[in-house]
Image (cartoon, grey):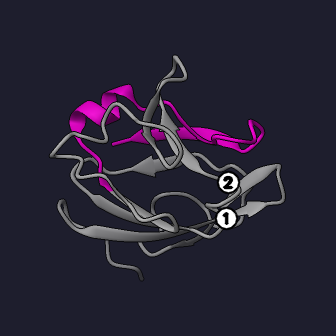
Amino acid sequence: PTPTPTPGSAVDLVIESEGFSAWVLAEDESGEVAPTDESNPTMTFGVGTRYAVENNGWDTHPFALRAADDSPLLSQSADGSYEDDDAVDWADDGGTFAFTMTDDLAADLNYYTCTVHSSMRGEAEAN
């Protein structure tokens, strides 16, 4: 069995695109964010957990977490409202981005998307 991450631990994820139509979570070391065999699965992030996400298609499929009003919270292609939050500790080197899910970010979180292809979108939540 996969160990459950403790608050404050880091979880490595790998996301990939299915052409221009969907995201797939290719790897989830925690086994708790989303199923790895679904298109645009609901992703569930744990408050207090740090995530390091390798985006294998980042150059053509920039990833973003957004609020219900479509404003970017964290984004590989725009300035998200939580990118300067010290507790979130956003880092983005292109292929990989990292963030810590905070209570405030969780409260605003609604969905994830590719900022170029609107069909690449799924629900995002936190617990």
Q: Residue 4's spot in the image, x, y percent?
A: 31, 70
Q: Residue at x 45, y 61 (%)?
A: 32
Evaluate if marks 2 and 1 touch, with contact meaning CB atoms under 8 Å apart: yes
Q: Residue 120's spot in the image, x, y percent?
A: 72, 45
Q: Quadrant of residue 97?
A: bottom left
The residue lying toward the viewer, choosing from 1 and 119, is 119
Q: Check the image and name the residue furthest to the bottom.
A: 1
Q: Residue at x 37, y 26 (%)?
A: 108
Q: Is residue 56 above or below residue 46?
A: below
Q: Residue at x 24, y 31 (%)?
A: 104
Residue 30 colored in magenta in the image: no
Rendered-image quadrant of the C terminus: top left
Q: Which residue is mark 1?
A: 57
Horizontal relation, residue 11 to residue 88: left or right:
right
Horizontal relation, residue 110 to residue 98: left or right:
right
Residue 115 colored in magenta in the image: yes
The residue stretch that appears in magenta: 99-127
Question: What is the CA distance from the residue labelled 2 to the residue labelled 1?
Answer: 5 Å
Q: Is residue 10 above or below residue 21?
A: below
The residue lying toward the viewer, choosing from 41 and 102, is 102
SS for callout 2: loop
The residue lying toward the viewer, choosing from 76 and 64, is 76
Q: Which residue is mark 2?
A: 61
Q: Give the amino acid at mark 1.
A: Gly
Horizontal relation, residue 80 to residue 41: left or right:
left
Q: Is residue 81 above or below residue 102?
A: above
SS for callout 1: loop
